[in-house]
Amino acid sequence: MSGLIWIVVIAVILAVCCGGGKKKTGSQGKPVRIDHPHYYDEDDHECSVCGARFRGKGMTCPKCGARFTGTKEDDEEFIEEMVVWDDDDD
């Protein structure tokens, strides 16, 4: 039984160390504002440091205060919405 507890403890430690703090940063590892355009809704933005989503186009995260050094566009949601919207027309 104690062997199982050690396996669980090690698994938790590995999960926290390796995958828990996944950050999306720019090519130099600097904070960027990730712009998410939408097909029929208002565009929103994401902080590459804390992952917060927000509407304003400011260059500072409203949640964690990170100062963005640039922007990056992620149009994945736009494409998904466009496909759904176009499928509704059929």
Image: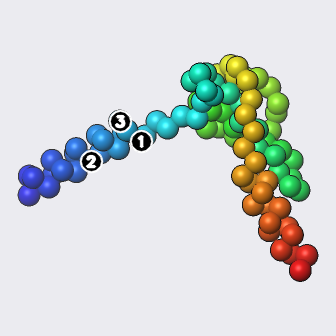
Q: Quadrant of residue 80?
A: bottom right
Q: Quadrant of the N terminus?
A: bottom left
Crowding at dot 2, Cα within 10 Å, few <14 / some 14-19 / many 20+, comes out as: few
Label 2 close to label 1 by CB (< 8 Å): no
> Type of residue at label 1?
Gly
In the image, is residue 79 above or below residue 13? below
At horizontal 82% and vertical 30% (from top left) the residue drawn is 57
In the image, is residue 79 above or below residue 31? below
Residue 11 numbered mark, or none: 2
Q: Mark 1 — residue?
A: 19
> Type of residue at label 2?
Ala
> Can residue 54 be seen here?
no
> Type of residue at label 3?
Cys
For marks 2 and 1, the one nearer the N-term is: 2
Determine whether, in the image, residue 54 is placed left or right of residue 52: right
Residue 17 numbered mark, or none: 3
At horizontal 78% and vertical 57% (from top left) the residue drawn is 79
Q: Quadrant of residue 62?
A: top right
Crowding at dot 3, Cα within 10 Å, few <14 / some 14-19 / many 20+, comes out as: few
Colouring: rainbow
- The x and y percentages for residue 87 are 83, 74
How far, Cα to Cα, is label 3 from label 2? 10 Å
Q: In terms of depth relative to the viewer, which is nearer, 51 or 62?
A: 51
Q: For mark 1, give the secondary structure.
A: helix
Q: Residue furthest right?
A: 89
At horizontal 91% and vertical 76% (from top left) the residue drawn is 89
Crowding at dot 1, Cα within 10 Å, few <14 / some 14-19 / many 20+, comes out as: few
Instruction: Count every numbered label the image shows and give the total.
Output: 3
- The x and y percentages for residue 67 are 68, 19
Q: Quadrant of the C terminus?
A: bottom right
Q: For mark 2, give the secondary structure.
A: helix
